[in-house]
Image (spheres, grey):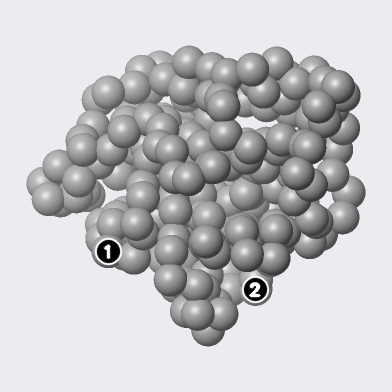
Amino acid sequence: MKAAIISDIHSNLEALLVVLKDIKKRRLKSIFCLGDLIGYGANPNECIDLCMKESKVVVAGNHDWAAIDKADVTTFNPVAAEAIKWTQEQISKEGANKLKGLELSHKVDNLFLVHATPTEPEKWRYLFSLEEFEKEFSQFEEQICFIGHSHIPAAIYQDDNGYCDLVRDNPFPIVAKRRYIVNVGSVGQPRDLDPRASYVIYDGNKNNIEIIRLDYNIPLAQQKIIMGGLPEVLADRLLAGR
């Protein structure tokens, strides 16, 4: 199996269109989406429709659930909460119904797909440190777990002795005696100081994984945010990649 894994689109239509174009150019027939279709950006309905249409699997993110009152928005920072309120006013009934049908996790062959963490995915915890990643390996049976949520692309492996470390190569081989947690980064709002859209290609035929970065029309996405009445800081951070 060969697939593209996308996450954290956050209503950024410009970034999503570029990523989908690249996926089609590479003739990848399967797309798995790890959630947060909406929030922050100016095109929630378009991004929901495209993700649902193009993806074989879509799991729920915390912003998706917050927009339909299934997650507690009081845990969000003020800017994120304001963006959710704006999104709730803009989202169509059809779009909201699509979000209501999303599950928290999904298994495909030897892959486990979830937005935040295998452990209690509804708690929306972040994984940053190696120790935090290490604790999650016991919570899924598959060889590879793909996540998003932090908007920071990274891959951690655990060998058959329980040793964990960061994968430093890109692309990198899938080693038979290792298991992996791979953060695919963010399509619509990267936070690793690289403003380019991020997604991952899983190639089960060649046994490797590659993080892809793509330029997109950031000024247009910024203009839409400002003209839509969303907080200007959301436009600023797109260019900064933070």
Q: Is residue 4 above or below residue 88?
A: below
Quadrant of res 151: top right
Using the image as rendered, state which of residue 69 and residue 27 is in the foreground.
27
Q: Amino acid at mark 1?
A: Lys
Compare marks 1 and 2 and give the one earlier in the sequence. Answer: 1
> Residue tagged by mark 2?
215
> Residue tagged by mark 1?
53
Q: Is residue 51 left or right of residue 168?
A: left
The picture places residue 157, in percent across and down from the top left corner, at: 78, 35
Q: Find the residue positioned furthest to the left.
A: 93
Is any part of residue 78 visible from this angle? Answer: yes
Q: Find the residue positioned furthest to the bottom.
A: 25
The picture places residue 93, in percent across and down from the top left corner, at: 11, 46
Measured Cα–Cα span from mark 1 to mark 2: 23 Å
Label 1 environment density (alpha carbons within 10 Å; few <14, some 14–19, many ≥20): few
Q: Element at badge 1?
A: helix
Q: Amino acid at mark 2?
A: Asp
Q: Is residue 112 above or below residue 199?
A: above
